[in-house]
Image: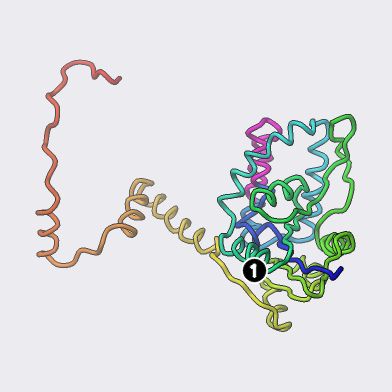
């Protein structure tokens, strides 16, 4: 039987905006499995990751910390976080990238999510998005339905991603030379080089430079950093004139046309009736709502 082609999609900052690890952390905090302090630290790390990407050291430390934090946690309790994690991940899926994934399926290729995140999350997300499967990491061993806190299995990061898809290719008779891979980070070079058609999505600087040199396709989507800069400007306005002023300024820029000239201002005033000075009679004594 002839080998089939496939398409492999990295998850964070490729198939979705931001970090799935943070969405997991937020769900774990709400369930009482993570402290507020740890959640805030993860939020800061997530912001840096979304703006600059992650280093190998950052990601390895994250895996070790997650593994240790799982020690003594029941597998069932973690499985119950699935709905909350998906509630955070699904709104951040890039519709354009998902459409590309479905187009690959329509053209006869199998489509897989390949991520350093937990394998259970990868499989669950693949089912929800109608993809063919998910490949993810196993962060901890299990004994009697409880996580041991000791890392086990292949860590699906860096060279581990290439190893995982090569293993899958042998098991399912996939032709990697005819396959595609999508990623945003230079850390995924092993996976990108393992296929015949690498595509970079919102690449970091190093990967963008390499993609130009290699002649690889580049897909650029909405960058969160641009919106964060806008949010920072509004935060400055809030500090100077109050949060209400900043919010009003934002709404005015988005919804209200510029008003120029006295005649235009008078016209607007005529169209908008003035509210009556007093809608209710005065209340003497204690106000009923206090």
Read off the magenta span. 23-44
Question: Can residue 159 be seen in this snapshot?
Answer: no
Is residue 90 depicted above or below 161 in this figure? above
Q: Nearer the viewer, residue 168 or 219?
A: 168
* Quarter placement of the N terminus: bottom right
- Neighbor class of circle 1 (other Cα within 10 Å; few <14, some 14-19, many 20+) is many
Residue at 36% from the left image edge and 50% from the top image edge: 247
The part of the image, by quadrant, that contains residue 55 is bottom right
Residue at 65% from the left image edge and 42% from the top image edge: 85
The prevailing secondary structure element of the residues shown in magenta is: helix
Q: Nearer the viewer, residue 17 or 287?
A: 17
- Judge whether residue 26 is colored magenta: yes
* Quarter placement of the C terminus: top left
Q: Determine which residue is flagged by label 1.
A: 201
Q: Residue 84: image x %, image y %?
A: 62, 39
Is residue 217 depicted above or below 114 in this figure? below
Q: Residue 205: image x %, image y %?
A: 67, 72
């Amino acid at each position: 039987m002839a080998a089939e082609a496939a398409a492999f999609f990295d998850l964070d900052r490729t198939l979705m905006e931001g970090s799935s690890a943070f969405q997991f952390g937020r769900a774990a905090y709400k369930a009482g499995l993570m402290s507020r302090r740890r959640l805030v630290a993860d939020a800061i790390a997530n912001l840096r990751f979304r703006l600059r990407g992650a280093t190998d050291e950052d990601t390895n430390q994250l895996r070790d910390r997650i593994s240790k934090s799982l020690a003594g946690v029941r597998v069932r309790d973690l499985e119950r976080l699935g709905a909350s994690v998906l509630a955070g991940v699904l709104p951040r899926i890039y519709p354009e990238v998902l459409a590309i994934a479905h187009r690959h399926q329509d053209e006869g290729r199998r489509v897989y999510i390949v991520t350093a995140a937990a394998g259970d999350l990868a499989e669950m997300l693949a089912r929800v998005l109608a993809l063919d499967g998910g490949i993810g990491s196993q962060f901890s061993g299990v004994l009697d339905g409880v996580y041991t806190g000791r890392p086990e299995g292949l860590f699906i990061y860096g060279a581990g991603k290439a190893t995982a898809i090569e293993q899958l290719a042998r098991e399912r008779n996939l032709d990697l030379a005819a396959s595609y891979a999508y990623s945003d980070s230079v850390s995924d070079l092993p996976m990108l080089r393992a296929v015949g058609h690498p595509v970079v999505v919102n690449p970091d600087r190093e990967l963008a430079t390499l993609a130009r040199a290699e002649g690889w396709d580049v897909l650029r989507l909405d960058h969160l950093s641009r919106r964060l800069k806008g949010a920072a400007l509004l935060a400055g306005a809030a500090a100077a004139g109050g949060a209400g002023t900043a919010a009003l300024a934002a709404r005015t820029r988005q919804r209200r046309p510029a008003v120029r000239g006295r005649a235009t201002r008078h016209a607007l005033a005529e169209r908008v009736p003035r509210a009556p000075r007093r809608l209710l009679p005065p209340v003497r004594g204690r106000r009923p709502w206090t």
